[in-house]
Image (tube, rainbow, N blue to C red):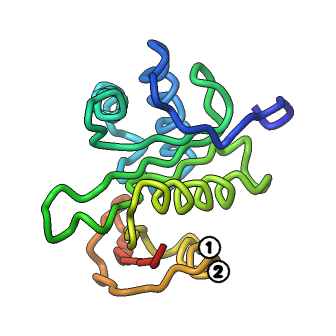
Amino acid sequence: MAEEFVSGPLRVDQPHPELPQALTDLIGRVTVAGGATGFTATTELDVISALAAEIVEDVAARPKRRHLLIMGQERALAGAVVLRPARLPVQAHRAEVEWLLVDPDAQNRGFGGQLLDAAVAHAQAIGVAQLHLTTRSGQGLEEFYTGRGWTESGRWPGSLRVAEGDVRDQVWLTREV
């Protein structure tokens, strides 16, 4: 993937039938490489596949329950960002960046920043005023986000067990759009 031409970020409006598998593959590659996906390297592929199918179903729903922006192609993803608008009326002005994923072979090419910027622009286009996300400590992700205008708004020490003996903080970040 790292040497191939990569297009995007592109907003997915009408998902290709192979998109759930491509998203499953991307989440799996990022997870196995140690990425902060919420899964562990021992998570059953069926669990990841079910989540990918749910995301694509939510993207195709009317009204959309999730928004997906991708880099690469719908059959082979170099990266993706999933944005989920809040559902409750008092939260209608905000959305969550659920996942920001970049293929491990495509790291250090600026795709993460491009996807995050595209998510912010898309959020603004759909009328979102605030974004929030959570990540885990120990990988420099807080610096990645704060360097792009996000503010740390909270931390839950030791709440994520990545592996036996590897406990991390969950970190909440927010951004005005």
Judge whether 155 appears above or below 109 on screen. Answer: below
Element under disc 1 = helix
Where does the image place residue 92, in percent across and percent down from the top left?
23, 64
Judge whether 30 appears above or below 14 on screen. Answer: below
Where does the image place residue 169, in percent across and percent down from the top left?
36, 78
**Which residue bears the numbered disc 1?**
144
**Amino acid, disc 2:** Gly
- The answer to which quarter of the image holds residue 30 is top right
**Which residue is pictured at 48% across the width and 22% down the height?**
19
Circles 2 and 1: CB atoms closer than 8 Å: yes
Q: Quadrant of the N terminus?
A: top right
**Which residue is pictured at 33% across the width and 52% down the height?**
84
- The answer to which quarter of the image holds residue 103 is top right
- Depth check, front residue: 28 or 175: 175
Where does the image place residue 118, in percent across and percent down from the top left?
60, 54
**Which residue is pictured at 42% across the width and 23% down the height?**
20
Judge whether 161 appears above or below 25 on screen. Answer: below
- Depth check, front residue: 105 or 81: 81
- Depth check, front residue: 108 or 126: 126
Q: Is residue 44 left or right of residue 120?
A: left
Judge whether 76 appears above or below 154 on screen. Answer: above
**Amino acid, disc 1:** Phe
Where does the image place residue 126, in percent across and percent down from the top left?
42, 54
Q: Residue furthest top?
A: 17
**Which residue bears the numbered disc 2?**
147
